[in-house]
Image (cartoon, rainbow, N blue to C red):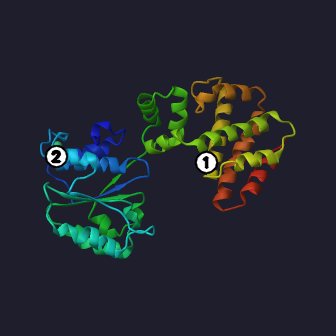
Amino acid sequence: MYSFDEIVGHENIIKHMENAFLRGKVSHAYIVEGEDGMGKKTLVKAFSKLLQCENPQGSRPCNHCPSCIQIESGNHPDIAYVRPTKKTGYGVTDVREQIVKDIKVRPYQSRYKIYIIEQAELMTIQAQNSILKTIEEPPEYGLFFLISSNSHKFLQTILSRSVKMSLKPINTERIEYYLIEQYGMNHGQARVYGSFSRGNLGKALILKDSESFTIQRQNMLKCLDIFINGKEYDIIEIVQLFEGVKTDILDNIDILISLARDILYYHSTQDIDNIIHKDIESEIIRLNQKLNPSRLIQLVYNSYTLINQLRLNVNYSLAVTVMLTNIEH
Ligand SMILES: [Zn+2]
């Protein structure tokens, strides 16, 4: 159900929406900006539900009127989801057909005619120019939500006529709590997904079901095992483990660094409760037994260098090899 009460985090944005509604100061255009997975559309749908509700109770929709029911089913006649017709983005024709012409028809049943423009940053300059006049002088019932992961792509004229709401990362502990409550996850697993989500609930939910993330963790743990326990370890074997999952090679390094961080943290504090990879704490304890901390610190240091090199598109296998050979024995 689309409801402010079920949204995790983003309290400041919810407050803003509630106040705008209660004070009758709803703007005609909003830019809702944030990383993919942060819940931009969920927030906009919850707000739209409140705005269109026939019988709102304070700042909450009734959840029973035809409008509320239509929003839940995704078939509200006065809410349009605008999407680009081509992969490259929105052209002038898309905007004209789906918005500029359409808005001239009054709402069918509700107070507002709402346009939820997805991936709005994909509007060409020409497309933005063609919508500008509509945003500047909309009919009183016209309401636009420009959903975007990057508002830098908008013309200054669009920005200046819109209220911008930016979604910020939420506390990872809240994500952990959500995973435990909603999915019955244990604390150890929830800690891992929460930490790697970087405050993005949607990302945590994707990681939760991601087979490649699980394999990446296993591979990186194996790398560290070889690195820590093998006196004369085989660099090629480690490179192959790095290459095992190539969906996002920078993720591999992120995981490696976080595992190394856990081992080093445990090594110096003997505190196993505050590590990230809580679900494999016995592995962390085991790897600590033969640890040469200064070597592992060098590995972490070299890993950061590797991240910078990979951003410059250096050959992946070569960069991993150099990272390992640079470490003194
Ligand atoms: Zn209602």
Q: Of 40 and 17, which appears nearest the observer?
A: 40
In terms of image quadrants, where is residue 271? Answer: top right
Mark 2, residues whose alpha carbon is within 10 Å: few (<14), some, or many (≥20)?
A: some
> Horizontal placement of 270 versus 121: left or right?
right
**Residue 164 higher or lower than 229, as above or below:** below
Q: Which residue has dot 2 on it?
A: 66
Amino acid found under the numbered disc labelled 2: Pro
The image quadrant in which ligand 1 is located: top left
The amino acid beneath tag 1 is: Asp
Residue 19 visible: no
The residue carrying mark 1 is: 251
Residue 238 position, x and y percent, is 77, 45
Left or right of 232 in this view: 174 = left
Say which element carries label 2: helix
Residue depicted at x 76% and y 25%: 289
User: Which x, y percent locates residue 256?
Assistant: 66, 42
Q: In the rendered structure, which disc, 1 or 2, sits on the residue that comes first in sequence?
A: 2
Instruction: Tell me the quarter of the picture where residue 282 sits.
Output: top right
Residue 95, image x and y in percent?
30, 70
Identify the secondary structure beneath mark 1.
helix
Mark 2 residue CB less than 8 A from any atom of ligand 1: yes
Q: Which dot, 1 or 2, sits closer to the camera?
A: 2
Ligand 1 within 8 Å of the CB at mark 1: no
Tell me the CA gap for discs 1 and 2. 46 Å
Q: How many marks?
A: 2
Residue nearest the viewer, comparing 16 with 285 = 285
Quarter of the figure that contains the N terminus: top left
Label of residue 57 in the image: none
Q: Farthest residue to the right: give it.
A: 232
